[in-house]
Image: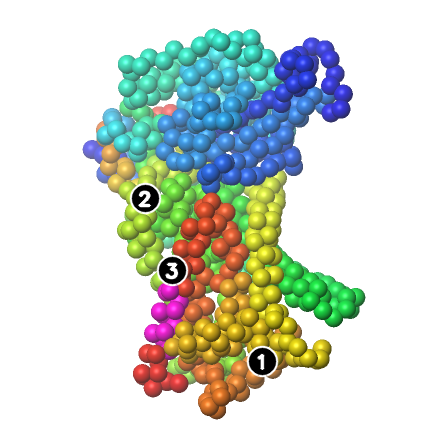
């Protein structure tokens, strides 16, 4: 499962970020490390980019970039 | 400070070597949106200098930070925001090189602005710097907001990280003295321990392993020092605002309303100061004229210097208003949402969502639009945006369109109700946009081709714009416009004046302006280029107007007024339309026809006739190559389009 497939409003947990690319590194530096909980908040009016929330921090990323983030679906975190 | 006091304080702050009260250099680093700019403004006040880093177009901001009244002020450098030392853009590379001491600027102490409301991610950069053994002091910004939700044990945080941590509320200037004290203590300690290598870098670790280790470390530190005050964080206010502002349907509507408001303001509020500036320079010219005797000096001052400077400053109200709105939108956090909403649309032209606002600003004036492209990190994307910005139909084109429509298309309607003038002006706007899209696409697939840059855009929490930050931006940006553009423009206005004023027509002082121009270098050039512009439907008089309009588009109106020997004042504009309608070629045919007017408008829609724009592009790209390329390719496009319009129109039987 990749982040771009997660329905709006759902939570997921980061498993890994593919590749050694600049984008992957940047995503990890911005907090997308394995185990982090991600919530997909919404997608932009034209369907792309998407708005996600990690560690109380709001990020917009394109679907092509979200595709490099492997996630597993989790129940909404209680915290 | 004239007298440097002696004593323990001085020892702490100033290099003790005799005669070298060395100024401390302090770098201010931090994530974008970490409150770095607010802190910088609070520390330095108005004593700031904005320039470019040598050889590149990244803006460098330095200021003087007086930490104690009896000591020399330290030099504070506001570095471009960065998330980590792994730089992905030019801005970030420059910041990284300064932070790691690889640049000619070597900071004595690094102040890292860490947003207390977003500790984990913000501490990442600080951790990297601490690991590298840099003298770091952490400024915990937005501490007041964080305190509402979190209990932060600052002392414990400082102990675990191994560097001083100072909570600050920059807006209220709280904690700044503590920050100054810690910075000095750190710089003094640094001097003692200069040879110690603190960094313990494990080279076997991959970048990814280091990254995971740092995050694990930060999470442990946070777990030991921060407690949430409430079990549930209060529902995120920004997210609730976003439910409307980036809503699938409401979002675009709100964006449209915001833009309508901005443009309404620019075009209505700016008119009053613009008229005042116009009057002021008109009066100044009158005064000079009444005090100086007839002659070259008087003409140089009135027609060259005063008219030239006035012609540029008249756009200052619009530019200031645009900067005001841009900085409010940026400071409040809305700009990132606009990029989020429009990225998909902009991407279909090969551009970035962040190009939307700069291009839109260019509809008022390309100068602030081009300066606003600084938010686009990728240099090729930024260049492509700069190169198409002047196609957005700016306000200086409107007077030209208005004159042409008043003279040749007034009181005509299509379908019985739409005025032809409105249709033509709308057409000119659409033409500019269409050409811009095509050019952007071509540029992005040829000389500016690059892999799509990452679009990882932070949507910062909404904040009330900080008036101090807004004022600083306004001051800095308008200062740049007046100074940089002003000097180039003054030089070119004098040159253009000289072209129209020399050689002097001999004879009595009652030589008319028209015959002076006809025999001047400008008039001769007009005749010289007549064969070139005849296929566009233009005669030599229009040629003179075109030459003068390369200074600024609307200048063609005053030039035509002189060429046709009518007054240049707006009140006499009617006489100019009359003169245009009745102008005849030597063979008796009319010089101006609706087709000629249309051809001229299309030329104006596409040509880069604006030295302010060229001067700003020169500044933003740091070379003459790009502005000259811009001037050249836009001229070719304008020529071809005008040619097709005029010749095509004639083939279709229009005149």
Left or right: B61 as drawn, with respect to A41: right
Return the x and y of residue B407 as percentages of the image width and height: 52, 81
Of B372 and B96, the residue lying toward us: B96
Density class for disc 2 (Cα within 10 Å; few <14, some 14-19, many ≥20) is: many
Q: Is residue B637 above or below residue B115?
A: below
Please tell me whether mark 1 sits on a helix, a strand or a loop. Answer: loop
At mark 2, the secondary structure is loop
Image point 28% across, 51% down: which residue? B445
Main SS of the magenta part reads helix
Q: Is residue B477 magenta?
A: no
* Element under disc 3: helix
Residue located at (59% from left, 13% from top): B188
CA gap, disc 1 and disc 3: 31 Å
In the picture, the quarter occupied by the N terminus of chain B is: top right
Q: Which residue is mark 3?
A: B633
Above or below for B41 versus B533 = above
Q: Chain of mark 1?
A: B
**Which stretch did the figure color magenta?**
B636-646
Does B637 lie within the magenta span?
A: yes
**Circle on res. B467:** none
Numbered mark located on residue A49 in the image: 2
Q: Residue at x 56, y 14 (%)?
A: B186
Contact between marks 1 and 2 (CB within 8 A): the answer is no
Q: Residue at x 28, y 42 (%)?
A: B451
Q: Chain of mark 2?
A: A
Q: Are marks 1 and 3 on the same chain?
A: yes
Dot 3 surroundings within 10 Å: few (below 14), some, or many (20 or more)? some
């Amino acid at each position: 499962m990749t982040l771009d497939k997660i329905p709006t409003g759902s939570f997921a947990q980061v498993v890994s970020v593919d590749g050694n690319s600049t984008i992957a590194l940047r995503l990890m530096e911005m907090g997308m490390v394995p185990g982090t909980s991600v919530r997909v908040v919404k997608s932009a009016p034209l369907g792309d980019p998407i708005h996600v929330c990690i560690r109380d921090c709001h990020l917009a990323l394109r679907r092509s970039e979200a595709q490099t983030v492997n996630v597993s679906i989790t129940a909404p975190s209680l915290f | 400070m004239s007298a440097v006091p002696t004593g323990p304080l001085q020892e702490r702050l100033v290099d003790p070597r005799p005669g070298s009260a060395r100024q401390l250099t302090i770098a201010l680093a931090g994530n974008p949106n970490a409150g770095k700019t607010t802190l910088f403004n609070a520390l330095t006040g108005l004593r700031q200098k904005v320039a470019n880093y040598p050889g590149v177009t990244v803006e460098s901001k330095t200021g003087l930070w007086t930490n104690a009244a009896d000591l020399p002020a330290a030099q504070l450098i506001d570095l471009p925001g960065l998330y980590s030392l792994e730089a992905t853009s030019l801005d970030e590379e420059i910041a990284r090189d300064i932070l790691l001491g690889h640049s000619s600027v070597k900071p004595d102490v690094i102040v890292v602005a860490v947003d207390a409301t977003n500790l984990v991610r913000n501490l990442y950069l600080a951790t990297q710097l601490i690991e590298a053994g840099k003298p770091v002091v952490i400024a915990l910004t937005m501490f007041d907001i964080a305190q509402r939700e979190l209990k932060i044990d600052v002392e414990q945080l400082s102990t675990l990280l191994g560097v001083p941590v100072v909570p600050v509320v920059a807006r209220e200037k709280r904690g700044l003295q503590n920050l100054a004290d810690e910075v000095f203590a750190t710089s003094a300690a640094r001097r003692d321990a200069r040879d110690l290598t603190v960094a313990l870098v494990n080279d076997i670790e991959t970048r990814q392993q280091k990254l995971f280790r740092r995050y694990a470390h930060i999470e442990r530190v946070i777990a030991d020092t921060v407690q949430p005050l409430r079990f549930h964080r209060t529902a995120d206010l920004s997210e609730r605002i976003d439910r409307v502002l980036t809503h699938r349907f409401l979002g675009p509507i709100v964006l449209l309303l915001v833009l309508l408001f901005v443009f309404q303001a620019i075009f209505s509020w700016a008119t009053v100061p613009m008229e005042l500036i116009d009057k002021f320079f008109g009066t100044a010219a009158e005064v000079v004229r009444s005090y100086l005797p007839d002659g070259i000096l008087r003409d140089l001052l009135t027609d060259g210097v005063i008219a030239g400077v006035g012609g540029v400053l008249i756009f200052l109200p619009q530019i200031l208003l645009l900067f005001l709105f841009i900085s409010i939108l940026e400071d409040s956090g809305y700009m990132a949402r606009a990029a989020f909403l429009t990225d998909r649309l902009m991407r279909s032209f090969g551009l970035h969502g962040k190009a939307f606002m700069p291009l839109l600003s260019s509809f008022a004036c390309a100068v602030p639009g081009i300066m606003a492209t600084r938010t686009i990190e990728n240099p090729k994307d930024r260049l492509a945006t700069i190169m198409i910005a002047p196609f957005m139909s700016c306000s200086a084109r409107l007077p030209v369109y208005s004159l042409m429509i008043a003279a040749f298309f007034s009181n005509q309607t299509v379908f019985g109700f739409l005025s032809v003038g409105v249709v033509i002006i709308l057409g000119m706007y659409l033409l500019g946009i269409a050409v811009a899209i095509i050019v952007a696409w071509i540029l992005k697939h040829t000389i500016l081709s690059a892999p799509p840059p990452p679009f990882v855009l932070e949507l910062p929490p909404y904040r009330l714009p900080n008036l101090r930050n807004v004022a600083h931006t306004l001051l800095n940006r308008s200062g740049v416009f007046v100074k940089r553009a002003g000097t180039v423009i003054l030089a070119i206005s004098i040159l253009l004046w000289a072209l129209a004023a020399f050689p002097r027509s001999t004879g009595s002082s009652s030589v008319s302006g028209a015959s002076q121009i006809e025999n001047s270098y400008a008039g001769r050039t007009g005749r010289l280029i007549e064969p070139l512009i005849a296929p566009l439907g233009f005669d030599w008089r229009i040629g003179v107007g075109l030459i003068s309009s390369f200074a600024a588009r609307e200048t063609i109106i005053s030039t035509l007024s002189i060429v046709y020997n009518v007054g240049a004042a707006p009140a006499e504009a009617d006489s100019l339309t009359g003169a245009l309608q009745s102008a005849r070629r030597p063979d008796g045919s009319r010089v101006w026809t609706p087709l000629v007017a249309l051809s001229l408008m299309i030329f104006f829609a596409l040509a880069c006739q604006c030295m302010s724009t060229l001067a700003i592009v020169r500044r933003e790209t740091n070379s003459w190559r790009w502005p000259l390329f811009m001037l050249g390719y836009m001229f070719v496009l304008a020529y071809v389009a005008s040619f097709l319009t005029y010749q095509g129109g004639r083939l279709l039987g229009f005149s």
